[in-house]
Every structure is written in structure tokens, then in C-alpha cells.
Image (spheres, helix red, strand yellow):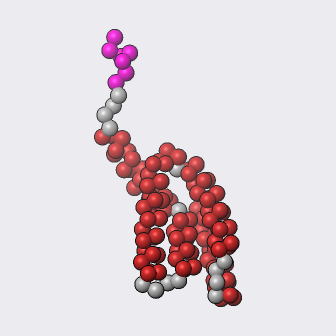
Amino acid sequence: MFLVNFASIFLFLVGCVYFDLKDRIIPNRFLRIYLISTFFLIVFEVFFYFEILYWYVIIKLLVFAFIFLLSLSLFSCKLIGGADAKVLILLFHSLPFTYFLDGIIRDLDERLAELRPEEEDEDDEY
């Protein structure tokens, strides 16, 4: 799955370079197609990380918010164009951060599980 994500990112970047050099425009249709394909890759990724789904969603939202603010600020300063900002957001949307942070997330989840109070069964008291 890891290689499929990086192969799709590579093909996406090659397509962006092709359209940018050919027409100096990256079509929105191309970006939509990539967004739909990464949606399916993320659905498969969720199946692998279902037991830590809470952390997976938090990481994806934090990365999206950070990259959105970064691309917005770079676009506002006229350092990048609109298509570059969209490509940056889609690129980081499809990066598999949970592969890199898997050990940290699982360790944090285990430590938080230790801190939760254990529920006692009512049947054990009799």
C-alpha cells in the first residue's frame, strides 16, 4: 500500500509538470481525478489503521490545516500561484503520514489506555 501511494504521487507530479510545461495551466479536471483516486487510497488506508482511527483523523486534519494555511500565506504573498497551492494541498492530502508515525501513535494510544479507569463488572461483586 505504501508503494501504491508513492507511485500515485509520482504520477501526479509528472502529470502536473507535463501540463505546466505544455500549457502553463494545470487543469482542474486533472486535479479532481487525482482527488478521487486519493480518496480511494485513503479508504484502503483507513482499513489498515481502523484500531487507531481517532488518531488517523486527527493527524490528517492537522496536516490539512497546516498545509492550507501555508499555501494560503504563500499565495497571499504572491510567492506561488493558485495551481501550485492546489497541488501542494493535494500532495500533502495523499501523503501517508500514518506510516511514518505508526509507532508513535500506537505507543501514545497504549499509554492513554493505561490512564483510563477500568470499568468494573457488576456481576463480580456478588
Please state, as top left, top right, bottom left or bottom right, where the N terminus lies in the image: bottom right
Instruction: Give x and y (percent) for residue 13.
Output: 61, 77
Q: Position of residue 89 (x, y in %)?
A: 52, 70
Q: Nearer the viewer, residue 59 or 29?
A: 29
User: Which residue is most to the top?
Assistant: 126
Residue 46 visible in the current orientation: yes
| Numbered range of the magenta stretch | 120-126
From this viewpoint, is residue 14 visible? no
Task: Please tell me which residue is depicted at 64% across the width and 80% down the height of the picture.
Answer: 26
Image quarter where the C terminus lies is: top left
Residue found 68% across the figure and 67% down from its top: 33
Q: Please name whichever residue, 12 or 49, is drawn nearer the observer in this view of the structure.
A: 12
In this picture, is 50 found above or below 24?
above
**Residue 118 locus on image (x, y percent):** 33, 31
**Above or below — where is 44 with respect to 24?**
above
Labels in figure, total: 0
Q: Is residue 86 left or right of residue 32?
A: left
Residue at x 68%, y 72% (from the top left corner): 29
Q: Residue at x 61, y 53 (%)?
A: 44
Q: Is residue 88 left or right of residue 126?
A: right
Q: Is residue 21 magenta?
A: no
Q: Position of residue 81 (x, y in %)?
A: 53, 83
In this rendering, would 90 be left or right of 34?
left
Q: As drawn, which residue projects farthest toward the front?
A: 76
Residue 36: which quarter of the image? bottom right
Q: Which quadrant would residue 82 be assigned to in this image?
A: bottom right
* Residue 121 part of the magenta segment: yes
